[in-house]
């Protein structure tokens, strides 16, 4: 499949239009990471028990 210069230019314009959305998505991920880390620091026991429960369930499913 051959791509002509017009198609390449159109695709480049589409990617350029999406860049601000990518910056916003990256910032949202950074904010969410901060919230998760804060929750883990505030509730380490709960997070440890949750991780053990999830690990147990995944182990049971994987062993079948």
Image (tube, helix red, strand yellow):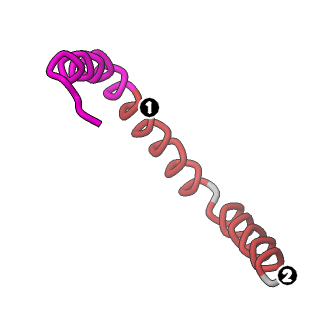
Range shown magenta = 1-24
Secondary structure under the numbered disc 1 in the rendered image: helix
The circle drawn on residue 45 is none
Q: Residues within 10 Å of mark 1 (few under 14, many from 20)?
A: few
Q: Position of residue 31 (x, y in %)?
A: 44, 36
Asked if residue 22 lies left or right of residue 55, the reply is left
Q: Is residue 2 above or below residue 16?
A: below
**Which residue does the numbered mark 1 point to in the structure image?**
28
| Residue 51 shown in magenta | no
Asked if residue 44 lies left or right of residue 33, the reply is right
Quadrant of residue 45 in the image? bottom right
Q: Residue furthest left?
A: 5
Q: Quadrant of the N terminus?
A: top left
Q: Is residue 36 above or below residue 19?
A: below
Q: Is residue 22 above or below residue 52?
A: above
Q: Earlier in the sequence, mark 1 or mark 2?
A: 1
- Separation of residues labelled 1 and 2 (CA atoms): 38 Å
Question: Chief secondary structure of the magenta span?
Answer: helix
- In depth, the one of 8 and 41 nearer the eye is 8
- In depth, the one of 63 and 47 nearer the eye is 63
**Which residue does the numbered mark 2 point to in the structure image?**
64
Q: Residues within 10 Å of mark 2 (few under 14, many from 20)?
A: few
Quadrant of residue 43 in the image? bottom right
| Residue 3 shown in magenta | yes
């Amino acid at each position: 499949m051959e791509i002509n210069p017009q198609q390449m230019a159109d695709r480049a314009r589409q990617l350029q239009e999406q860049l601000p959305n990518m910056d916003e998505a990256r910032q949202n991920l950074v904010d969410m990471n901060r919230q998760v880390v804060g929750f883990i620091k505030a509730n380490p026991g709960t997070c440890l028990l949750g991780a053990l429960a999830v690990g147990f369930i995944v182990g049971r499913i994987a062993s079948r």
